Amino acid sequence: MPELPEVETIVQQLNQQIQGWRIIDVWSDSFRKQNHLTWPQFQSLVKGKKIKQAARRGKNILLNLEGDLILWIHLKLTGHLLVGHYLFRNQKWLSLEQGYYQDKENTFIHWVFTLEKQKQQKQLVLADRRRFAKVVLLTQSEFLKEKTFQKLGPDPLAKDFTASRLKEILKKTKGPIKQVLMNQEYLSGIGNIYANEILFEAKLNPFKKASELKEEEIDKLFSAIKKVLGEALKFKGTSAEDEAYRMLDGSPGSFSSRLKVYQREGEKCVRCQSIIKRAKDHNRSTFYCPHCQQV
Ligand SMILES: [Zn+2]
């Protein structure tokens, strides 16, 4: 699932590529009834609206549209956005471009927004092999009432997210540090890939209770959060084993080769040469170095 660095990469690219473009048509085979909106109502609200800006809240993408409307997109497991030129033929959307657009992962198309600017057209497309992605239209007041956003913890890359803020947060928690890092109500944007990488960077055992971390351990954790997320963003995110995360041109992120523990079970630790271990918890895998990350 895309996490903070992946979603931030997408949002930055959306602002470069579709800001100021007008939605002139929308197609979907995956519309789910939402906030009392039917499909024809959804279509008529969205059509003709200009995309003012793309923004990120945690792992959520928000497209601010004219008319105080917000198109809320959560990519979930395999969803990803593409921008390019597409054609609807024989009940299927086909990319007119070569290269990454033709990758199998980019062909499971379930949403298409046709955009126009100065008589030019292109498409914003949601491809999603497993079809869990969410596309919801909200008014400004519905957005303010939406629990998902009310409950969201601070953004770890925000300037006002400091080590002392992290200390305050951790004090109130009950679970192991890895679970805490991934809980969107404590911190927003971190998932399984970066929780593993951050804890390796900080030399902390993933199963240690977050509320029991010492002052200097929290300082290390804080630096690791900023460092790992910042570097992953610089390399435009991670396309993990399933290769589901893609940028707007369909290409994968390049941080994957820089992962130090995630999906590296059985390989040697880059710091101490011990063998990286994998443990299962809550249907997720935890990867760690048993030597560098002792309790
Ligand atoms: Zn090690």
Image (cartoon, rainbow, N blue to C red):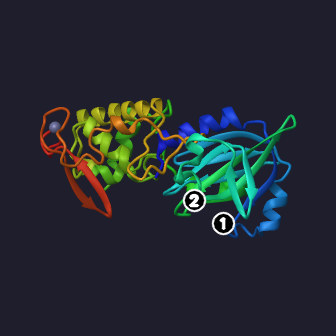
- Taking the image as shown, residue 279 lies to the left or right of residue 152, namely left
- Residue 92 drawn above or below residue 209: below
Q: Position of residue 71 (x, y in %)?
A: 70, 52
Q: CA distance from mark 2 to mark 1?
A: 9 Å
Count neighbours of disc 2 (C-alpha within 10 A) and say few if under 14, some if 14 to 19, many if 20 or more: some
Ligand 1 - quadrant of the structure image: top left
Residue 159 position (above or below residue 75): above
- The residue beneath circle 1 is 30
- Image location of residue 123, percent across then percent down: 73, 46
Mark 2 and mark 1 lie on one chain; the one further toward the N terminus is 1
User: Relative to 56, is 78 on the left or the right?
Assistant: left
Residue located beneath label 2 in the image: 133
Amino acid marked by disc 1: Ser
Proximity of marks 2 and 1: CB atoms separated by less than 8 Å: yes
Residue sitting nearer the eye, 167 or 258 = 258
Residue 146 appears in the figure: no
Q: Position of residue 138 (x, y in %)?
A: 72, 56
Q: What is the three-letter code of the residue carrying label 2?
A: Ala
Q: Which mark is residue 15?
A: none
Residue shown at 37%/30% (left/top)? Answer: 227
Instruction: Indicate whether 189 appears above or below 16.
Output: below
User: As rendered, which of 77 and 55 lies closer to the eye?
Assistant: 77
On the rendered structure, is 22 left or right of 270? Answer: right
Residue drawn 24% across the image and 43% down it? 213
